[in-house]
Amino acid sequence: MKFRQISIIAGIILFLGSIFLFRLLSSGPQEEQTATNGGNDGIGVAVQEIKNEAITSSITFTGNVIPKNEIQLFAEVQGILLDGAREFEEGMAFKKGEIILKMDDREQQQLLKSQKSQFQSLITQILADIKIDYPNEYDAWFDYLNSMDINQPLDKVPSSENRQFTLFLSGRNVLTNYYSIKQSEVRLSKFTITAPFDGVVTQALIEPGTLVRPNQPLGQFTQTGSYEIEASINASDRFFISTGDNVALHLDRDQNTDYEADVARINARINPLTQTLLVYLTVKSNRLLPGQYVSGTIEGETFENADKIATKALVRNDLVFVIENDVAVLERVEVLTTENDSTIVRGISDGKLVINEFRDASFEGRNVVPVRN
């Protein structure tokens, strides 16, 4: 008996709870908020007042920072790597002209001095013949011999318009020895690697005291302060970009960090899959680093008698809701171009209020109350 009474009471409680829950849900927030305007109830909607004027479109892009100059260091000669004034390590900076790497070149230096000494002896031997057979050439070659220093780079041999005298020098192997010495000087210079520009060692593959062999990779040297941005834009925007155009850049996710860049090159090939085109920008900054992503804006086409509205305001791609006599009415527009969250349109009269948020076409005819942003 008690069990039956408990069951009846539990059922009554469950029934009353269901009624309470139903009323609670039915009194919850409505799908559309209403407002009062002059005694007429209407749905509050965010609006934008149209002001037609000349609007310049913006071409936005993101791109990767790449060094303007980056070289791989290779050995062209063989020798022991010496300790330099600064260690060859990743992150070490060098100014243009400073020595990055130097190998032991003493053997090559002695060989070069020997060649120059033999060259001096050769010229000394032929000076008497030059004085007798080619007296007009003697003074130039005598002065050339006296100015020769085996510790300094060899000067260019005196020039002559006498074809027979040139053949005389070739027959005595003067010119052959001269070019052999110049070749050895070039080879000697390859024992020292200097910085071709201001930069940083971004990869070091060798340490001092190691035997370096020809064609051995030594590391990587990257220019600092001067970079390129490889940006991808829509192919349809290519007519609005020219080399030399100024571009505003900022670090990705940091709208407050601005840089100035210039359009350096425009690729002539369109990616068939993405229908985009690569544009290369140059920028100088000591704050950027290779590998960073930046965003930018390039000015595009200018449209007369147009205004910019939110893209989400479009209905079926070319319709918008305007307010006429407190009622939402669909009106057709001419879509000129789209820029991410905004769209430039033409065809709406000045002063009209456009509902600046997405509404389905079935919303037409509803009473509305404008809520200005």
Image (tube, helix red, strand yellow):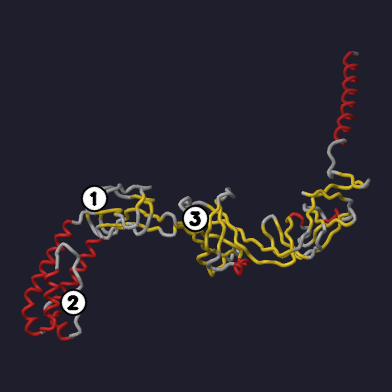
Q: Nearer the N terminus, badge 2 or badge 3?
A: 3
Q: For this view, does 158 lie left or right of residue 95?
A: left
Q: For this view, does 33 lie left or right of residue 146?
A: right
In the rendered image, the residue lying farthest to the right is 39
In whole angstroms, how far apart are the C-alphas of marks 1 and 2?
38 Å
Query: Residue 275, image x and y in percent?
Result: 60, 65
Q: For this view, does 364 lie left or right of residue 193?
A: right
**Image height of 30 relative to 133, above or below:** above
**Image height of 69 relative to 92, above or below:** below
Q: Quick one: quadrant of the N terminus?
A: top right
Query: Residue 236, image x and y in percent?
Result: 63, 67
State the residue at coordinates (17%, 60%): 109
In whole angstroms, how far apart are the C-alphas of marks 2 and 3?
51 Å
The mark found on residue 158 in the picture is 2
In the rendered image, the residue lying farthest to the top is 2
Of the pair 270 and 194, the residue shown nearer to us: 194
State the residue at coordinates (30%, 47%): 87
**Image height of 351 relative to 42, above or below:** below
Of the pair 8 and 138, the residue shown nearer to us: 138
Say what secondary structure mark 2 lies in.
loop
Say what secondary structure mark 1 lies in.
loop
Query: Residue 309, image x and y in percent?
Result: 74, 57
The mark found on residue 236 in the picture is none
In whole angstroms, how far apart are the C-alphas of marks 1 and 3?
34 Å
State the residue at coordinates (44%, 59%): 68
Q: State the residue position of label 1.
A: 82
Q: Nearer the N terminus, badge 1 or badge 3?
A: 3
